[in-house]
Amino acid sequence: MAKAQGHITVRRRPKDGEQGEVGISYRVSFWQSGKKYHYDLNLTGGATERIIDICVNKPLSLIGDSGFKAYQCIRTHTSSDSIPLGNVNYWTAVNNFQPLVSPLILASKIVADFIDVDDLAANTGFISALTVSKLTVKDSNNNIIAKIGDMSNYTVDSVSGKYPFWIGGSTPANSVTRIDSTGKLTTTNIVASGGTIGGFSISTSAIGTTGDSYGSAHTGIQQGRIYIQNSASSSGKRFVELNAAGGSSKIRIYSDYDIDTGLYVGGKITTALWLETGVIAGLRPQYRYLANSDFPYTLRWDDFNVFIHNTNEVTLNLPSSPAKGQTAHIIKTGGGLLKINCNGSSVWLNGGNKTGTFGLTSYNAFIVLFFYGSSNCVMSLHVED
């Protein structure tokens, strides 16, 4: 059966003591080919359903339009192109359903394909399903503040696109929150006190992998802190923190007991650390101790303080490709000969150049090496008698 657009039921009063026939249901719908339409006014015998169909050629919302027509079925039949709506053998024209104007309509049920009102008020409303093509929300000054379902093109940040939802503005470009047709959310104001983002949970005071319990094993952001920690205790464990809480700013980096480096800065960068002012407390550069068995030895990029105690003849190789500005402080003790292998560099010492290999026999000596090029080095030598 066609989907009903209107339904009116009339029941016949029975004779005294007798069961009356089932009442007539007037069913209003669009006419369609291939549908069975009923005229059951004279149908008797206890039928469970008796219907008289009324078909219209346009939506009910167009009632009053000059082209609107309504017909009542006068013979039960299945419609077809050869039995169209208005065929005088199966249909009869009925009242043109002129518009009804009334200050009050009371009905237990209203079915319509379109309702157009300036104002709709209800104390209690229940809608099991609502389909709209576009919904516009305005404030008390009749300004647009939100739209839903608008698939027009709008230009945002010089890019044209469709924004079926926005709120807090007259257009998507000046809205507080908008969602484009791909589902992308853009908002300038978000408040979240719970939920998750990927593998991170949100609480009232933190975003982290295991909640907002600062000091627990987790990674996240909490109350001015950015932290990475794999143990509830920071003592001797991996722990990274950028902390601006409590009016203080700090960077804390802890490591396991078996990790020598607390802070590592690498990569191709011009400046690893630049302090224009302030005090560095507790600075202790890399230290290396070398004895007879450690030679021959080649200076590393991180050999800043080197202590050599040799009683035998040993050879110290300068780096083959030193970095500009690389510096080494060497303290030599012991009576053994220390040979310096320039390793391709030209070493300026006491007003002259040294190349190849040369020796230092002093028992106690303090040597400073400064590389100012890829193969140029200045050596300062202080000998203590």
Image: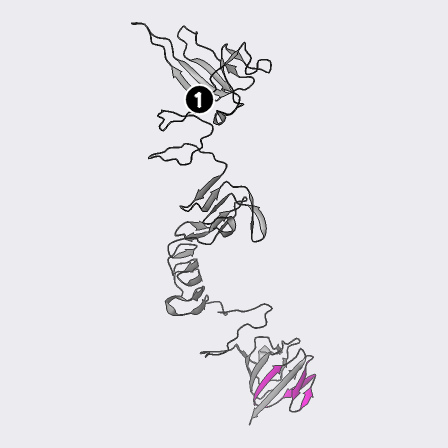
Q: Position of residue 295 (x, y in %)?
A: 61, 78
Of 262 and 109, nearer the camera is 109
Q: For the stretch drawn in magenta, what is the main secondary structure?
A: strand
Of 222 and 16, nearer the camera is 16
Q: Say left or right for 245 vs 331.
A: left
Above or below, 367 against 215 in this view is: below
Q: Position of residue 217 (x, y in %)?
A: 41, 58
Above or below, 247 against 141 in this view is: below
Look at the image and give the residue range highlighted in magenta. 343-371
Q: Position of residue 98 (x, y in %)?
A: 45, 22
- Quadrant including the C terminus: bottom right
Q: Identify the residue at image location x=69%, y=87%.
A: 353
Label 1, secondary structure: give it: strand
Q: Identify the residue at image location x=38%, y=27%.
A: 102
Q: Say left or right for 121 vs 92.
A: left
Residue bearing the label numbered 1: 6
Q: Position of residue 316 (x, y in %)?
A: 62, 81
